[in-house]
Image: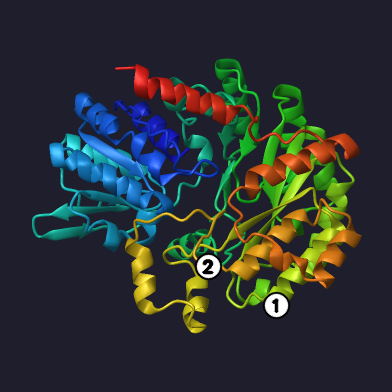
Amino acid sequence: MAIEYLSAYLKKAGHKTSLVYDPSLFELPPFMSKTLQKYFSWRDKIVQAVLEQEPDLVAFSVVSDDFGWACNLAEAIKAKSDILIVFGGIHPTSVPERVIKENFVDYVCLGEGEEAMLELVDSLEKKKSLRNVLNIWAKHEEGVIVNSPRSLIKDLDELPFPDKDLFFAEYPGLVKEVYTIATSRGCNYRCAFCYNCYLGKLYREEKTYVRRRSVDNVIAELVLAKNKYGIKKIFFTDDLFISDKVWLKEFSAQYQEKVGLSFTCLVHPSFVDEEVVDLLEESGCEVIGMGIQSLDEDLRKKVLKRPGDNEAIKRAIELLNKTKIYFYVDMILGLPGQTEEELINAVHFLSIYRPDAVATLWLRYYPKIEIIKEALKRQLLSESEVEELEVSKSYTPLAIKGSTFNESLGKLGNLMLLSPLLPKKWIEWIIQRELYRYFPASTSLHLHLNSRIMFMVKKIFFKKRPYSYRSLVWPIRYYLYYFKKRFFTS
């Protein structure tokens, strides 16, 4: 969506944009394979496509997991041209001083990019100085121009709708199968493992970090998308979709009448109550993702800096279990101070209260997030390892190992996946006899297999709504499309 918003904003101002897309075959779970990655690499085609278009500027939207990928491509483009390159996104925002040192990066864009990118492009077009272009760091003959961050965009309704044409033209399924939309920017919380803890500091002088689009604006985008692209399902990517109950009431009424498609959203248990659940169910919500992360209240409060108590989690699960909404909970493995006992207690809890599914993810240390301080204090990380995080070009998926893989915790994590599926007595029997010690430690397929297994069980026996993120055939169609394009298209 960052790319879509930047494109729309630049186009509105009269600039031309285009997309060069990497399908990343065999680079993501569940089909990861380093051997096949090399064979199905799109790198040469991407570089060729960029050079053929002769752009004035190439922009990469970079999260830490993709930093190595972005560097690899940018370096290849620079080797064959003098095209200017800018890196933006959360990774360059977190460590601009590291990113700007890369010899193939000309500019770094911090924070929200719409206004900054337009000013950068206008300045380049008119050959104006980049000094005082807020959010932009730029290489200069005498060194690096370091400009301060600009204020956050206050009124999100002023932004043009994201340019979905870019990805629809590339492959319609990227837009049509699941339409991604954000109704807000920012989060109410500053959890120590999340990028919001860093952005909250970066924008600490801002009076309002969380900003929300009007209901009319959101509905207008969705109605347009429904008519233009024939979208099937919707995923609201907001960190906390239900944080404003007044907004949610107005949204629910309009959404039912004007959009009426199934959707997925993310919630925090502290905001879940009967009225909110009713509004979501009436609107057509099919799937809810709810972050729990840990059921040790002390660890959750002191290490994760995450508010809320277990009573709120119990209440939220009990309320959602009364609905037809399929819901899963997120749990993090490998937290500083996490023990086998803590995970066993979590398994007990989940087997009693029984969410529809559990998603376990390994902790990943990202640049400048707060939990790094805890890891340093406990000597789980050294100062040199923290520095390496800021420049690392490697990628270890959260679903496989993250930064903190541990075999004994991984085995309990797999038991946790079974906790809502197996009868409670079976779970207790496994724990008493420590049979989980014979479980595999790897969890590389759990996000896909566990969700599908649980969906089938819940649909048959509890009449839950379908699991709506993507159909089972979607990845097959996607891979076949790009196999054909890779080998049979010039």
Q: 65 or 41, which is in the foreground?
A: 41
Residue type beneath disc 1: Asp
- Asked where in the image residue 144 lies, by quadrant, the reply is bottom left
Residue type beneath disc 2: Thr
Q: Residue lying at the far front in this picture: please name it.
A: 438
Mark 1 is surrounded, within 10 Å at the Cα level, by few (under 14), some (14 to 19) or many (20 or more) other residues, namely few
Residue 124, horizontal then vertical, whole percent: 18, 39
Q: Residue lying at the far left in this picture: please name it.
A: 141
Q: 118 or 319, which is in the foreground?
A: 319
* Comparing labels 1 and 2, the label whose residue is closer to the camera: 2
- Asked where in the image residue 425 lies, by quadrant, the reply is bottom right
Q: Which mark is residue 298?
A: 1
Secondary structure under tag 1 reads helix
Q: Is 435 on the left-hand or right-hand side of 128?
A: right
Q: Residue drawn at (40%, 52%), measured in percent from left and top?
A: 111
- Relative to 228, does residue 248 appear above or below in the rendering? below
The residue at which mark 2 appears reads as: 404
Q: 177 or 284, which is in the foreground?
A: 177
Q: Residue drawn at (41%, 64%), measured in percent from left and top?
A: 367
